[in-house]
Amino acid sequence: MNSTNDIVEYIKEFGGVFRFGSGVLGKSAIGVGILMIAVAIASWRLHSDWMIIAALLIGTAAFLIWFFFVLNFSEKHPDIAMLEGAEWSSYQRFQASAKGYLPTAQDQEVELSPGTQIQINVEPKQESDKET
């Protein structure tokens, strides 16, 4: 049981070395990398020259299709293609502030779901500058 745990820890440590890109480009590149590894394994394991050429052509066609779709998407949506999560939302806030958008009080209101209980602690105002 301990050797299985050691193997899992080793794989976690080995996987932590890689830094994959963010956004659509980085995440989809992982899939294309797996496709290229599959094509390489197929080419290595197949015995027929025609089957090897067919595997290489299918892999090349899949890569080119992915590449042109990603280029087209990146041209239309460069922010989504390169950023994700908190990076993307902070970029949107930056763009809004650069355009002079200031949120109104209504935009900053907190909306609670029905049945949610809230506690409001209001401290009494202390008057320290009383006139005597």
Image: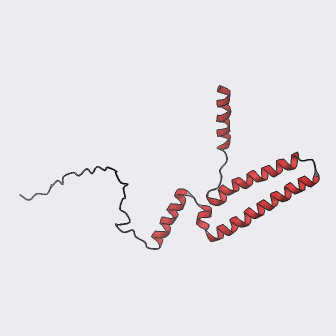
Q: Nearer the viewer, residue 123 or 69?
A: 69
The residue furthest top is 1
Answer with left or right where residue 36 lies relative to residue 96. right
The residue furthest left is 132
Name the residue located 73 percent from the left edge and 55 percent from the top edge: 32
Q: Is 77 above or below relative to 28?
A: below
The residue furthest bottom is 99
Name the residue located 37 percent from the left edge and 58 percent from the top edge: 111
Give the x, y percent position of residue 56. 85, 56
Give the x, y percent position of residue 2. 65, 26
Answer with left or right where residue 25 lies relative to residue 112. right
Name the residue located 47 percent from the left edge and 74 percent from the top edge: 99
Image quarter in which the C terminus is found: bottom left
Q: Is 84 above or below relative to 9?
A: below
Give the x, y percent position of residue 121. 25, 50
Q: Is 5 above or below relative to 102?
A: above
